Image (cartoon, rainbow, N blue to C red):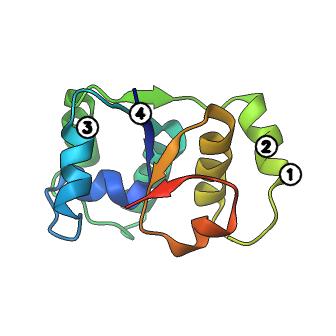
């Protein structure tokens, strides 16, 4: 079984049925034969950006979170192993949330579903 970790924009676009998400990526996420994971860091980032008005969700955060929970994705907590991996990453990418997702994907052997070109500078599998 393939195992994937959703980048923040990927989760937002999937949950909002956004046309910027390629149809093939949306189909992959909906495929029940693959394992889809979201990071606690992603939910944290969305909560912060929504509360600051830097992100507009289609409904209030708590309702949006219920929609996301209905997909039954695995939620990946942040562990010491992830933080140790994060500590060793070169600083190609400045975004702390993205750096943590990269560290989690490396540590857990997950493929990141993202359009972020900076991810390719790290030893992580990326698909879009």
The picture places residue 45, in percent across and down from the top left corner, at: 49, 53
**Eye-nearest disc, 3 or 2:** 2
Residue 110, image quadrant: top right
Mark 2 or mark 4: name the one nearer the start of the chain: 4
The picture places residue 48, in percent across and down from the top left corner, at: 47, 55
- Kindly identify which residue carries mark 3: 68
Q: Which residue is drawn at 68% across and 70% down?
A: 93
Instruction: State the SS at label 3.
Output: helix
Name above or below for residue 127 compared with residue 110: below
Binning the other alpha carbons within 10 Å of mark 2 as few (below 14), some (14 to 19) or many (20 upward) gives: some
- Kindly identify which residue carries mark 4: 2
Q: How far apart are marks 2 and 4 (CA)?
A: 22 Å
Task: Report the side of 82 relative to 125 (left or right).
Answer: right
**Eye-nearest disc, 1 or 4:** 4
- Kindly identify which residue carries mark 2: 85
Task: Identify the image quadrant of the C terminus.
Answer: bottom left
Question: Observer-nearest residue: 60 or 13?
Answer: 13
Kindly indicate whether the residue at mark 3 contacts the one at mark 4 (C-beta within 8 angstroms): no
Kindly indicate whether the residue at mark 4 contacts the one at mark 2 (C-beta within 8 angstroms): no
Binning the other alpha carbons within 10 Å of mark 1 as few (below 14), some (14 to 19) or many (20 upward) gives: few
Count up the numbered dots: 4
Q: Distance between the residues labelled 4 and 3?
A: 20 Å
Task: Report the side of 56 relative to 111 (left or right).
Answer: left
Q: Residue at x 41, y 33 (%)?
A: 2
- Kindly identify which residue carries mark 1: 88
Mark 1 or mark 4: name the one nearer the start of the chain: 4
Name above or below for residue 81 compared with residue 106: above
Task: Report the side of 102 relative to 9 (left or right).
Answer: right
Kindly indicate whether the residue at mark 1 contacts the one at mark 3 (C-beta within 8 angstroms): no
Instruction: State the SS at label 2.
Output: helix
């Amino acid at each position: 079984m393939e195992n994937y970790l959703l980048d923040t924009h990927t989760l937002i676009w999937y949950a909002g049925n956004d046309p910027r998400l390629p149809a093939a990526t949306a189909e992959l996420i909906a495929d029940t034969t693959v394992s889809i994971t979201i990071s606690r860091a992603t939910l944290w980032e969305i909560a912060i950006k929504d509360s600051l008005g830097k992100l507009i969700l289609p409904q209030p955060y708590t309702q949006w979170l219920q929609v996301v929970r209905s997909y039954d994705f695995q939620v990946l907590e942040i562990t010491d192993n992830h933080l140790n991996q994060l500590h060793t990453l070169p600083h190609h990418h400045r975004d702390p949330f993205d750096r943590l997702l990269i560290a989690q994907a490396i540590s857990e052997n997950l493929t990141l579903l993202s359009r972020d070109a900076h991810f390719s500078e790290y030893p992580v599998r990326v698909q879009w």
